[in-house]
Amino acid sequence: MDERKVLTSYVLRIRESLIRAGVRHVVVSPGSRSTPLAYAFAHSEGVGIHLQTDERSAAFYGLGMAKATGEPVAVLCTSGTAASNYMPAITEAKYARVPLIVLTADRPHELREVGAPQAIDQPGMFGRMVKYSTDFPVPEERPESLEYIGRHVQRAVSIATDAPAGPVHLNIPFREPLLIDFGLEDPGLSFRSVRRGMMIPEPDMVRWFTETAAAAKRGLIIAGELSPAFDKEMFWKFAQSLGWPVLADPLSGLRSGVSEENEALCIDQYDAILKNERFKQEMAPDTVIRFGPQPVSKPLAQFLNGNRPHTYIVVDESPSFRDPYHLATDHFQCAPEMLMGIRAGIGPSEYAALWSDASRIAAQETRRAVSSGTDEGAMAGVLFAGMADGSDLFASSSMPIRDVDTFFMNTGRDIGIFANRGANGIDGVVSTAFGVQAARKRPAYLLIGDLAMLHDMNGLISSRFNETDLTILIMNNDGGGIFSYLPQAGEGRYFEELFGTPTGLKFKNLAEMYGCQYDAVESADGLREALRKPKQTHVRIIEAFSDRQVNLGEHRKLWQAVGDRLDAEWNR
Ligand SMILES: Cc1ncc(C[n+]2csc(CCOP(=O)(O)OP(=O)(O)O)c2C)c(N)n1
Ligand SMILES: [Mg+2]
């Protein structure tokens, strides 16, 4: 076989094995060394190609796609620092448990560590951030080599998707010449499939849980981020049979598509409620069952920490269950769906009614703040109200995800909410949002702060190559608004230089550069009006100007109002 045929068979084997293992999308960044694989992907119906020239953004785009689908998504780049730029998204993928398949092209072994251009020490370069890493041999004409490559690709994807899901790295060396033969086909894979069974709870676990739940006087369900594939209908039947309030993180997806029947149990205002001391003291749970990771809310964490429940069950398919406050007393290692088949037959309690009343009261105050306020919270509320049924929101780290927690309340609409909460970075946010949109193929919104926007402006490059439908609402408070809520705000010295970090930058010219429809607004009413205008470009930017200090004051006013109402309730 000539060299070109050997190279072609090799990359076709990689491609076909990825497809068979369930990879349907690959995010490609241009470069020379990755040429054979880039061609192989482009020349296939089985896998969709998405382009992004900046590798840091490209990997976040892939992360967004994988997060939104729960499926493995591949990213491909050339050798050198192109690969290094994948690191932030790989880190997020590890901690957010997202199956990212990282393909880095490399120089052949004889060109490594000898001063060859664009050659860096790539094998194992992502260290402990990946679940698995391998350095493939250069293409060679041996059937067992192809078998090895194909099976190893499928093994790697399997490792990535197994609980806890996470990134894997395949380092793939190529020798020049790098052109492939487009006329060749893969003769077919001998390895057919990976089939994974489900982790079912043992009968003893089910019995113990049913008894524990029946004995509980104050049971709570906590739902952190859940995959879009999570069976909500089944979950609500499980919750109804317990009659326990469900503290639903915005990323759980449980606040969307809420039926009238489930509305009372779905507690969306716990973050505001749990700032009230009296409520916290009176409402300590004795039994908790948690699905997904610990929610975003800090007051919830403090509440649980201050009243350590007697029983705190974490349901997680992976042995490395997440428990940042060391609250867990039991880990149920099984697929949540399997546990949700339990019908406890307990039903509503006085305790649940108290949560429900408090959440309703807080929601009234929050709605009032949205209709009369003009700060970032009110604007988040206006955005939420303006989102169409069947759309998605990506929330940046920092204040956006916290405002979403407060202002994105239970709704009957179908609205997906996503964020990067694995490592809570303000990097790669724009790109992850584009990736989520590309995977979900429906209108998406991005709520983002000015610094996070500056961090990943290159994310917009993808819109030059790929179909998209994204409305970006930039909350421009000229710096890091979140720091005003932290203790360093009380220490006046160096605050603006070290934490506030105002840049004085505005985004109008960025919108112009990308040909985006652009509106600048200064109030909630202004935003309402802007959102009513029809969307005319694939990416639309709305820049909302706000003041960090005013914003802090308005948020505190709302929490105070909620607290006062709850106090009044207790004293009634
Ligand atoms: C990559 C990364 N760098 C730094 C941080 C620390 N950090 C958290 S929030 C924040 C400020 C974010 O500002 P902005 O995006 O404008 O949002 P705002 O706080 O104003 O809501 C910073 C720097 C981080 N989380 N991630
Ligand atoms: Mg800001």
Image (cartoon, grey):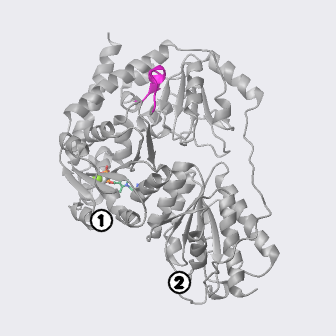
**Quadrant of residue 188 in the image?**
bottom right
Queried whether the magenta region covers residue 41, the answer comes back as no
Name of the residue lying farthest toward the front = 183
Residue 531: percent from left, percent from top:
25, 44
User: How crowded is the residue under tag 1: few (<14 C-alpha within 10 Å), some, or many (20+)?
Assistant: some
Res 570 label: none
Label 2 with label 1: CB-CB less than 8 Å: no
254 or 275, nearer to the observer: 254
18 or 197, nearer to the observer: 18
446 or 399, nearer to the observer: 446
Distance CA(mark 2)–CA(mark 1):
31 Å
* Residue at left offset 18%, top offset 43%: 526
* Residue at left offset 71%, top offset 26%: 206
Name of the residue lying farthest toward the bottom = 115
Q: Is mark 1 within 8 Å of ligand 1?
A: no
User: How crowded is the residue under tag 2: few (<14 C-alpha within 10 Å), some, or many (20+)?
Assistant: some
Res 514 label: 1
Residue 171: percent from left, percent from top:
63, 72
Labels 2, 1: front one: 1
Work out whether mark 2 precedes mark 1 in sequence or the reverse, and give the earlier one.
2
> Is 361 above or below relative to 5?
above
Q: Is residue 226 left or right of residue 504?
A: right
Residue bearing mark 2: 118
> Is 79 above or below relative to 545?
below
183 or 118, nearer to the observer: 183
Residue 7: percent from left, percent from top:
68, 80
Q: Is residue 278 left or right of residue 245?
A: left
Give the magenta-colored segment's residue range.
Answer: 257-268
Q: Is residue 520 left or right of residue 87?
A: left
Residue at disc 2, secondary structure: loop
Q: Amino acid at mark 2?
A: Gln
